[in-house]
Amino acid sequence: MLLLFAYSVSAFAQGEKDPNFMSERRIFLWDVTISMVGATNEAPDKVAASPRKNPDFDYKGWMYSKSRDIFDATRAKLCNLIDDIDGLDCEIVVVPYTTDIQPAFHVPSSSPQDKERIKKMIMEWDNLKAGGTYTGQCLEKVMNTSLEQMQAKVMAAQQQYAEQLKLATTQ
């Protein structure tokens, strides 16, 4: 499962764009729960299949279902979505998650070089951990954590802006 959050920021000072802000940031939430690699506790497929190797996963306690293994297709779709980003003025963030947020991938622009860098990170990712098979429950926890982190950043930015405004009005 992939979720995309895109938002735009308009930061202008005296009619000119502030170079510290990209016009757009695309955040992709990438489901890397073990169900994405075909781990299941239900009856296995009728056709025998060897469990995957990239990412490698010890299916101890789980059965492997080739028909439910959508990891490679999802990873390829994510790379295609990144390729489809137009222009250079877009920051790209990919946040893999299981029951928790995993270390994110980030590139500062959507230049061809940065797109290739982040796609390489995605294709080489191999940090699958046991736990987190129910996407809905995992996503809820990740979204709540993300919203709390964003809220803290917004509050800090508001406080900084208020302090700058106070300094400007007292001078």
Image (cartoon, rainbow, N blue to C red):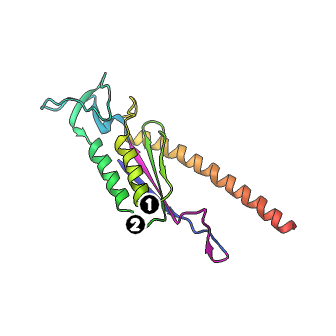
80 left or right, relative to 4: left
Quick check: is 126 in the magenta stretch?
no
Quick check: 164 above or below 70? below
Residue at the far bottom in the pictured view: 15
Quick check: 15 above or below 68? below
The residue type indicated by label 1 comes to Ser
Task: Give how far across and how far down residue 130 sits, in percent.
Answer: 38, 28
Nearer to the camera, 22 or 8: 22
The residue under label 2 is 86
Quick check: 74 above or below 69? below
Mark 1: secondary structure: loop
- When asked about the image quadrant of residue 55, the answer is top left
What residue appears at the point 55 percent right and 49 percent down from the top-left corner?
A: 147
Distance from the alpha carbon under mark 2 to that under mark 1: 8 Å
Residue at the far top in the pictured view: 60
The residue under label 1 is 110
Marks 2 & 1, CB-CB < 8 Å contact: yes
Q: Which residues are magenta?
A: 14-31
Mark 2: secondary structure: loop
Task: Give how far across and how far down residue 16 sits, in percent.
Answer: 62, 75
What residue appears at the point 46 percent right and 43 percent down from the top-left corner?
A: 140
130 left or right, relative to 142: left
Quick check: is 24 in the magenta stretch?
yes
What residue appears at the point 37 percent right and 47 percent down from the top-left corner?
A: 120
